[in-house]
Image (cartoon, helix red, strand yellow):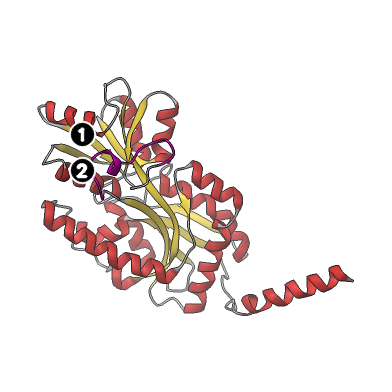
Amino acid sequence: MATRRLLLALSLLAAPALAQRPAGFPNRPIRLVVPFAPGGNSDTLARLIQPRMAAFLGQQIVVENRSGAGGAIGAAQVVQAPADGHTLLFDSASFVVAQFINRNLSFDYERDFAPVGTVADVPYLLGVARGRGITDVASFLAAARAAPGGLSYGSPGVGSIGHLAGVMLAHRAGGVRLEHVPYRGGAEAARDLAAGTLDAAIISGNSLNPLVEGGRAVIVGTTNAAGIGAHPSIASQGFSGFDVTSWNALFCRAGTPEPIRRTLEEAVNHATSDAEVRARYAAAGAEATPAEADALAARLVRERALVRDLIRETGITLG
């Protein structure tokens, strides 16, 4: 009898949330567009929450990789779809920068998308090939000053957090020359770092850690202020205030009915609260975060202002 009363109480507590679920949604498989290449950090994180979201919503979720143009090709796919929650964008912090890269877009990132919520925060790592005598930020910058053309570094693309972090480091180090080499994803940059094509890479742990574990690369510093585990931050190595963190978030079309948007927010929270997902995110160098749509909207405003300031201060050309 006690067990029955407990089950009844739990069902009553769950009833309001279930009652708010919009009727008829979803009524077909959901497209989850990842605007980056397969195997990179965004793709990995999207595929980790995919089955949990699908279970919550009761519909299949299909991940589609549509890379190119700093994420704009994938974003355009979502803009062209109906605003009914069945086509979603799983983007990174480059979502903020895209408007500064592609000035002739047929859509507007601020106008045409609605935030569902942040899924993960993703600090980036500055890594170099092992055996070059570079072990920290000071020796990295010394090598850049000594090299005739500076050092090259790869990132997941123009306007990515890796790209911006390199620009900020070069600027704050007094104009050290760091040549940016954009890729379609962190996995491709890691491949060329391992092959010796690149001097360095500023990418996620998901892409860089296999090289470190295989003895082919060393981590010089992290782009977030706190550091990651035993790896010190760039900020702690003479660059106080240096704090650049990528993230991944879910977006739907602007105009999507609010009950559908909130249901998607609940689905993300269901997925990221799963213990296995959180552990696998951590292994990929990411921290699962609550999917709060309003908090993400405020974050977008702040970070767009930061990018504008960086462009003004450094003269960086993104487009």
Considering the whole magenta stretch, tell me its main secondary structure.
loop
Q: Are marks 2 and 1 in contact (CB under 8 Å)?
A: no
- What residue lies at 29% left-to-right and 36% top-to-bottom? 201
Q: Position of residue 33 (x, y in %)?
A: 42, 57
Is 63 rendered above or below residue 184? below
Label 2 or label 1, whichever comes before in sequence order: 1
- As measured in the structure, the alpha-carbon distance from the residue carrying label 2 to the one carrying label 1 is 13 Å
Q: Which residue is mark 2?
A: 169
Element marked by disc 1: strand
Q: Identify the image quadrant of the C terminus.
A: bottom left
Question: Residue placed farthest to the right in the image?
Answer: 1
The reply, left or right, for residue 139 in relation to residue 130 is: left
Q: Position of residue 255 (x, y in %)?
A: 40, 77
Range drawn in magenta: 228-241
Q: Which of the numbered marks, if any, corresponds to residue 152?
A: 1
Q: Residues within 10 Å of mark 1 (few under 14, many from 20)?
A: some
Q: Amino acid at mark 2?
A: Leu
Q: Identify the image quadrant of the N terminus.
A: bottom right
The reply, left or right, for residue 20 in relation to residue 110 is: right
Q: Position of residue 86 (x, y in %)?
A: 49, 67
Give the image quarter of residue 143.
top left
Residue 39 on the magenta segment: no
Question: Residue placed farthest to the top in the image?
Answer: 131
